[in-house]
Image (spheres, helix red, strand yellow):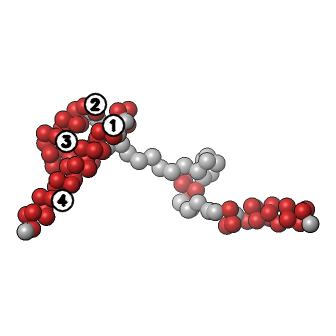
Amino acid sequence: MPSVIIGLALLALWLYCLFDVITTPAQDVRNLPKFLWVLIVVFLADIGALTWLLVGRPRREPAVHPAGAGGWARSGEAPRGPDDDPEFLRTLERRLRDED
């Protein structure tokens, strides 16, 4: 029974990696051309899948705040909603007063 579960988990890993290689844009693939990664994952199965995950898959780009260098991604802060921004709340209060 445990060998069946392990086998299904390895099959799922292999299928995930194969699909991931196929759907990844060629310019984002690291270290080898995309067609070689497909061959590695197909023919080396689980070793190829793990290799793809470790050295072939594109790295995720860190999130960058649209404001640029002073953004939340570099300062370690989480993004704030407009209702948490004191400047936004001040301008909102001004606009509400101006409407009255």
**Which residue is denoted by mark 2 in the rendering?**
33
How dense is the environment of label 1, judged by Cα within 10 Å: few (below 14), some, or many (20 and up)? some
**Which residue is denoted by mark 4 in the rendering?**
9
| Residue type of the residue flagged with mark 3 | Val
Disc 4 from disc 2: Cα separation: 27 Å
User: In this rendering, is residue 76 above or below 33?
Assistant: below
Q: Earlier in the sequence, mark 1 or mark 4?
A: 4
Disc 3 from disc 2: Cα separation: 13 Å
Left or right of 92 on screen, residue 59: left
Is 53 or 41 nearer to us in this picture? 41
Badge 3 marks a residue whose secondary structure is: helix
Disc 1 from disc 2: Cα separation: 7 Å
How dense is the environment of label 3, judged by Cα within 10 Å: few (below 14), some, or many (20 and up)? many
Expressed as whole percent of the image width and height from the top left, the position of residue 79 reads 58, 60
Badge 2 marks a residue whose secondary structure is: loop
Q: Do the residues labelled 1 and 2 touch (CB within 8 Å)?
A: yes
Q: Residue at the spot x=16%, y=55% of the render?
A: 10
Q: Earlier in the sequence, mark 3 or mark 4?
A: 4
Q: Do the residues labelled 3 and 4 touch (CB within 8 Å)?
A: no
| Residue type of the residue flagged with mark 4 | Ala
**Which residue is denoted by mark 1 in the rendering?**
29
Badge 4 marks a residue whose secondary structure is: helix
Q: Earlier in the sequence, mark 4 or mark 2?
A: 4
Badge 1 marks a residue whose secondary structure is: loop
Locate residue 5: give its quadrant.
bottom left
Expressed as whole percent of the image width and height from the top left, the position of residue 11 reads 17, 53
How dense is the environment of label 2, judged by Cα within 10 Å: few (below 14), some, or many (20 and up)? few
The dot on residue 41 is 3
Disc 1 from disc 4: Cα separation: 25 Å
The quadrant in which the C terminus is found is: bottom right
Locate residue 34: give its quadrant.
top left
